[in-house]
Amino acid sequence: MAMRRIGVLTSGGDSPGMNAAVRAVVRTAHTHDIEVMGIRRGYNGLINGDIVELGQSMVNGLMARGGTMLYTARCPEFMTKEGVEKGRDTLKYRGIEGVIGIGGDGTFRGLRDLAECGVATFGIPATIDNDIACTNYSIGFDTACNTAIDAIDKLRDTMQSHERCSVVEVMGRRAGHIAVYVGIAVGANAILVPEHKLDFERDVFEKIRYARNHGNTHFIIIVAEGAGKAIDVAAEIKEHIGMEPRITVLGHIQRGGTPTARDRVTASRMGKHAVDMLMAGKKNRVVGIIDGNLQDFDIFTALDMKRELQDSMYETAVVLSLSR
Ligand code: ADP
């Protein structure tokens, strides 16, 4: 029998465009004549029964809003068998037959555990880090990069006036996608990512010296948070080059803001796809965009995939950073 009611949740770190995905889920469900329940605060909502009906009017005006109207939170209890079983029981009690989870790998692990309890699930990748393996693109990445670029452009103006060095820490605990994209886009002198073992002499000092010998009077170094702390990188530069870098940690600013066209459109496409596929009887899958095309992958397979930093992208960043 066809489903009549599904649930949607956002979990893990938020990212701009999550709201657009929730809106797409609600709108698409409406055309299939099914109800959507909003599960609030990630998996906590499943455990506590913190669930509200999402009517059509509740997603009006949501497209342009950053953050997530469903709230998000970590939920350690859902990492236990009892927690997952509580979640399954809540769903049964509320007559919710399928769950769409919007978030990162942790969120998908929760969905996988629900799937093992017999719940139909679908995952939508949303994380500014863009580190989900089964998709070339995760919702929020473009907005986060643009926010960082905007901030660094402003920094550059003042660094240029004062002929200074700036070390900017961007997000990316395990992945350097933001650092590389942003580094290319702002023309950074050096870009440090967790995927490449750091050699200060080669990756930082030599580049600054080279840039200085070629007429640069101000310098921008981008550090992914997973590659090291801006404050430590600045201390090394001070010790070995003699400059006193200014430090900027962009932090959570990168997670907010109104989503860009790319994030709105991607979130809309993915949200619609997830509902259409659930209605077509597919389940326990994660949406991905590969070479611009929507696809979906088995959730177990998706979780086993490994995402890597594109070599050509890193090489472009290195070549264009005015170094040898
Ligand atoms: P993200 O989804 O952005 O990767 P987290 O790793 O913080 O974020 O995971 C978000 C939530 O997903 C966790 O707080 C927890 O509720 C759930 N989760 C994460 N890992 C697991 C797991 N192994 N089993 C069940 N639930 C999990």
Image (spheres, grey):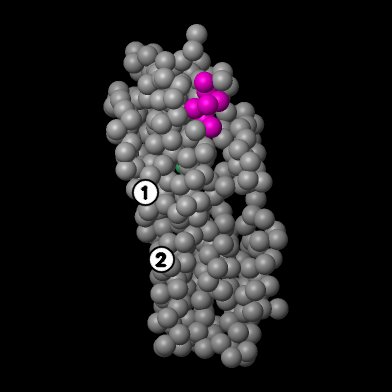
Image point (40%, 25%), residue name: 30
Percent position (x, y) of residue 222? 52, 69
Q: Which residue is at the far front?
A: 31
Disc number for residue 88: none
Q: For label 1, count other residues whose C-alpha is less than 10 Å away and answer few (under 14), some (14-19) or many (20+).
A: some
Q: Is 119 situated left or right of 48 in this image?
A: right
Q: Which residues are magenta?
A: 273-279
Placement of the C terminus among the 4 image quadrants: bottom right
Residue 85 in magenta stretch: no
Q: In the depicted view, which residue is nearer to us: 196 or 136? A: 136
Q: Amino acid at mark 2?
A: Val
Q: Amino acid at mark 1?
A: Ala
Q: CA distance from mark 1 to mark 2?
A: 26 Å
Q: For label 2, count other residues whose C-alpha is less than 10 Å away and answer few (under 14), some (14-19) or many (20+).
A: some
Q: In the depicted view, which residue is nearer to us: 54 or 11? A: 54
Look at mark 2 in the image and give the residue it sits on.
249
Query: Measured along the vertical axis of the image, is residue 270 above or below residue 171?
Result: above
Look at mark 1 in the image and give the residue it sits on.
64
Image point (43%, 46%), residue name: 17
Percent position (x, y) of residue 77? 38, 29
Q: First in sequence: mark 1 or mark 2?
A: 1
Indicate the secondary structure of the residue bearing disc 1.
loop
Which secondary structure class fits the magenta region best? helix
Image point (62%, 32%), residue name: 297
